[in-house]
Amino acid sequence: MREFLLESPLTPEFLTFLKSFGTVKEYPHMKRPYFSFEQEHFISLKGFVGDSSVEVRYRKEFFDLTSDYFHLLLFYAKQGESGARKMLEITDSIREKMKVRLPR
Amino acid sequence: MGNNPGISPLIYLNNAATTWPKPPEVLDEVAQCLKIPFFEHGRSTAGSATDYPSETRLVLAGLFHAENPDHFIFTQNATDSLNLLIHGFVKKQKASFHAITTDLEHNSVLRPLNTLAGDGKLTISTVPSEDGYIPLREMKKAVRPETRLIVMSHGSNVLGTLQDVQPVADLCADNDIFLVVDGAQTAGQVPINLSAISGGAFVFTGHKALFGIPGIGGFYLNDPETTAPVRQGGTGTDSRSLAQPVEMPQKFEAGTHNYTGIASLLAGIRFIEREGQDKITTKGRNLATLFLQEIKNDPNIILYTPAPDLPVVSFNIRNLDNDEAGYILAKAYNIITRTGLHCAPLVHDRIDGGKGCIRVSFSYLNTPEECRAAGEAVREVAEGANR
């Protein structure tokens, strides 16, 4: 688990972007609007919309493949549809490498 | 309490894991202990140094009403104690035997027993709890002619229930069974009378309700012949002999003591004696009751401990994973709880389908205001998860 302090707060748009890659749970009525993100085998996130810190958890067995994944999500989220396409390509490529290690 | 800039003051409610803060005299004693060379038996030492192990055995004997201070053995923690006692007992047995435990146990009991079962050293029966309590009739039903060991917790770290150990001790005495009582949750929290478990062993840890620092624990062993030492080494006594001394406490203690840990334990017990064990017990129950009053009528909160004996309250919030609830409480309210399985997997199978829960646990040093604030925060999170 790692806690990252981001340059700018997490936005609702970033959450919308995340939905293409895994399951986003949103609780907007909390004291601070909480969200979590889960992408099986990749990463899970916990944080608050409008907050600059986020907790990122990795699966130990795939950490070598996913250690940069959160940063890539942040980077490509800023690039609109072309960023989403590129991120899906990266995700598929990582998933292919994971398949080799997953039990059949 | 410590402060985190920008948000509410820290409310620490994970005292069933490790109490925090410690009484100031505990911190002072640890610092004092490090200022001069340690007093070590059988070795030259500064004259004014405190003999922490001997003094602490005496205060432990006083607090727990134990007959023989030298039968207190220092270890790292309750897990270490349980491992030493269980593995040592197995070492003494000539053949595989039957052991009994309960579904309330911590992995510090379950894992050593299951490891030994895997090695063919013993078989295990697990007695199921009913509403957090181990029925004596079920314990009696589990006893077989080849039963030699019962390991059970005195207080549940998940449900906060307190077991009546005396009838089980009597059952053990009648059937030549070695009883090991895990007092990790109860030592320092409730009055302990070790004369009630004559023939057995009582395990404690220093870093919970005894207010010591992490890394110190121990056990009390009535009859040193019931279990064998699994560690051997220097004791500062009888050094010509290549065999481990048979006298207590050297029989089970080898190597340099954790002096700072023992010093913290000494100061923690003196704090308990000064405040009064009964007062500490009562305050713990009152704090738990106060917190329960805050949350018990909320339909979005699933309570697992409607009336705990110890200051431990476990619950879940509908439509919110316990892990996420713990995160929200920590980050948005600065309230530290413990979430998940609490290292007691079997009890979770019974109460929450094995998913785990949120646990809040109070210390004598928590305040009613903190309880109310925590209750209010939990209600607010429950509402936010269900709107």
Image: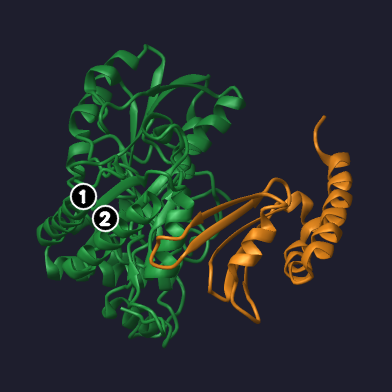
Chain colours: A orange, B green
Label 2 near label 1: C-beta < 8 Å? yes
Relative image position of residue B345 (x, y in whole percent)? 46, 37
**Which chain is disc 1 placed on?**
B
User: Where on the picture, by quarter, is residue B74?
Assistant: bottom left
Residue at the image point whose x is 77% and y is 67% from the top? A80
Q: Residue at x 69, y 45 (%)?
A: A40
Few, some or many C-alpha atoms within 10 Å of disc 1 (few <14, some 14-19, many ≥20)?
Answer: many
Q: Which element carries disc 2, helix, strand or loop?
A: helix
Q: Can residue B76 be seen in this snapshot?
A: yes
Picture coordinates of residue B83, whole percent (x, y)? 49, 43
> In the rendered structure, which amino acid carries the disc numbered 1?
Ala
Residue B189: image x %, image y %?
A: 22, 55
Q: Which residue is mark 2?
A: B69
Residue B163: quadrant of the picture: top left
Q: Amino acid at mark 2?
A: Pro
- Secondary structure beneath dot 1 equals loop
Instruction: Name the residue located 32 percent from the left edge and 83 percent from the top edge.
Output: B28
B341 horizontally vs B163: left or right: right
Do the dots labelled 1 and 2 sit on one chain? yes
> Which disc number belongs to residue B66?
1
Q: Separation of disc 1 and disc 2 at Cα?
A: 7 Å
Residue A1 appearing in the image: no
In this rendering, is residue B47 above or below B339?
below
Q: Which image quarter holds the N terminus of chain B?
A: bottom left
Q: Chain of mark 2?
A: B
Q: Is residue B38 above or below residue B145?
A: below
